[in-house]
Amino acid sequence: MNAVVKDVMTPDVITVSEDTPFEVIAAALRANRVSAFPVLDQASRVIGVVSESDLLAKLALGNGDDEMPGMITGILRQQQLKKAHAVAAAELMTSPAYTAAPEDTVEQAARIMYLRNVKRLPVVDADGRVAGIVSRTDVLAVYSRTDADIAEEIRTSILAGETLPNPGTLDVSVTGGVATIVGRAQTREQAHAIVGRARHVQGVVAVRDRLDHLDYPGPGPARFDVLATFPTD
């Protein structure tokens, strides 16, 4: 399994235009029980995102008086004052929007949301037009895979392709997304490579290394656990 954004996104997206009034946006957020809308230009391309937090500036800051927290200064202060005075989407939105493509991996989308501290990403096609929207909840769906599915993928896509001193000596069990790999590898490097590949399997929460290897001197290798992470390569 290698889920991509189009597998988990919501294809039906409510959008607003640049000139959509403040009160219309607020009412639509409330009526549709969502927290943000992509903003489209006249060519239907995504140019920004307007969220409930953008609208809150008007309520929190009123008419833009100077009663603002001391840490909000400089450029940030000016941005918040602008939002407090805004009357349409073009003035409220965060732009440019962070986006994902339909063929991006779920991990790529998750990394953008984590690093940029955003809750959702508009999904855009090659022409910049909206194709869907993906949320944090959507990307976390990879962790709903069954333990049996995860174990089968590790066996067939990783363990089955390894050259071993005794064929069939590697195996894996998965409980609660935690994969435990047991058996004997040829070398320390091979054992570490197997563990590294297993931790990138979608749905894996962590990998427990219980591998021995032929070139390790002494009674056996140090055992260690490896947290699953989003790949950086």
Image (cartoon, helix red, strand yellow):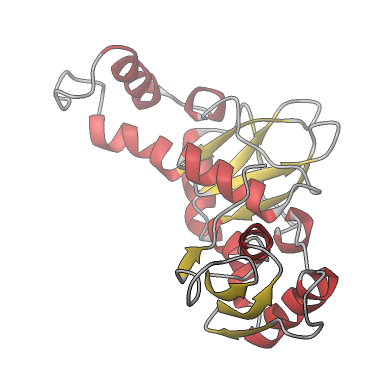
Residue at 65% from the left image edge and 60% from the top image edge: 200
Q: Quadrant of residue 52?
A: top left
Nearer to the camera, 190 or 87: 190
Q: How many marks?
A: 0
Residue at 49% from the left image edge and 39% from the top image edge: 115
- Left or right: 82 with respect to 115? left
Give the quarter of the figure containing the N terminus.
bottom right
Nearer to the camera, 165 or 4: 165
- Left or right: 195 with respect to 88? right
Residue at 61% from the left image edge and 63% from the top image edge: 199
Q: Quadrant of residue 209?
A: bottom right
Nearer to the camera, 217 or 168: 217
- Left or right: 72 with respect to 88? left
14 w.r.t. 209: above or below: above
218 w.r.t. 19: above or below: below
72 w.r.t. 3: above or below: above
Please state the horizontal and vertical placement of residue 93, each as a whole percent of the image: 52, 30
Nearer to the camera, 54 or 176: 176
Residue extending farthest to the top is: 74
Please state the horizontal and vertical placement of residue 125, each as a whole percent of the image: 83, 39
Please state the horizontal and vertical placement of residue 30, each as a whole percent of the image: 47, 56
Give the quarter of the figure containing the C terminus.
top right
Please state the horizontal and vertical placement of residue 168, each as a whole percent of the image: 79, 85
